[in-house]
Image (tube, rainbow, N blue to C red):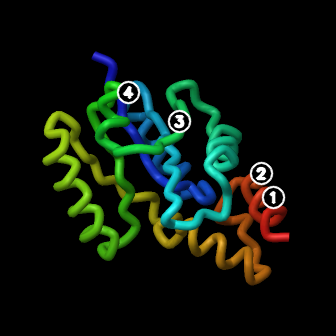
């Protein structure tokens, strides 16, 4: 059986923490689908196509595919024959929200499991929103994102 996981997120931008979780998922699953969510409500810095492109540029693993996510996550998981949804937890504060999402997803699609993963400690404080804020204020984001992503963020903010 081909074990397929979906790792959804806005990835605005993709961070080293995201990359760490993707790398670790590849050690557990046969295929990992990075589902880049449209998330208009979050008012992303980058349009969906550009976020997909940035993820594709920094992922160098044949086990990983990158796809847009514009609808309901559980429907996306079913359409892609995924058995598992991956959710990252950086801190205890993430758990309440993620726990609610996992419960709702289980109700909507009981055949799809949710697996919570924590990033390596050296990435536990990194979030896309913090990266964007640091960049907006002229700070160095090179330790938080891939070099090509840092270039894209800085160009977007110019």
Is the C-beta separation of discs 3 and 4 under 8 Å?
A: yes
The image shows residue 14 at horizontal and vertical percentages of 60, 54
Above or below, 142 against 137 in this view is above
- Name the foreground residue: 57 vs 143: 57
Tag nearer the camera, 3 or 1 = 3
Against 146, is 78 above or below?
A: above
Query: Is the residue marked by circle 2 packed among few (<14), some (14-19), or many (20+) residues within 10 Å?
Result: few
The residue sitting at 35% across, 45% down in the picture is 72
Q: Which residue is mark 3?
A: 67
The first of marks 3 and 2 along the sequence is 3
- Check disc 4 and report the residue beneath it: 80
In the rendering, which numbered label is found on residue 111? none
How many neighbours does mark 4 have within 10 angstroms: few (below 14), some (14-19), or many (20 or more)?
few
Which residue is more in the foreground, 44 or 150? 44
Q: CA distance from mark 3 to mark 2?
A: 20 Å
Q: What SS does tag 4 mark?
A: loop
Tell me how many marks there are: 4
Q: Residue shown at 62%/43% (left/top)?
A: 52
Which of marks 4 and 2 precedes in the sequence?
4
Proximity of marks 1 and 2: CB atoms separated by less than 8 Å = yes
Residue marked by disc 1: 151
Give the structural element (helix, strand or loop) at label 3. Answer: strand
* Marks 1,4: beta carbons within 8 A: no
Most distant residue in the bottom direction: 137
**Which quadrant would the N terminus be assigned to in this image?**
top left
Which residue is the site of mark 2?
148
């Amino acid at each position: 059986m081909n074990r397929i996981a979906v790792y959804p997120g806005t990835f605005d931008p993709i961070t080293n923490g995201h990359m760490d979780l993707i790398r670790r998922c590849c050690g557990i699953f046969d295929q990992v689908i990075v589902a880049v969510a449209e998330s208009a409500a979050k008012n992303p810095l980058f349009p969906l196509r550009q976020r997909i492109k940035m993820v594709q540029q920094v992922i160098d693993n044949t086990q990983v595919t990158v796809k847009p996510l514009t609808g309901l996550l559980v429907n996306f998981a079913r359409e892609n024959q995924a058995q598992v949804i991956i959710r990252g937890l950086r801190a205890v504060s993430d758990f309440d929200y993620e726990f609610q999402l996992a419960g709702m997803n289980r109700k909507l699609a009981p055949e799809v499991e949710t697996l919570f993963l924590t990033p390596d400690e050296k990435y536990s404080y990194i979030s896309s929103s913090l990266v964007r804020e640091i960049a907006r204020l002229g700070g160095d984001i090179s330790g938080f994102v891939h070099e090509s992503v840092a270039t894209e963020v800085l160009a977007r903010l110019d």
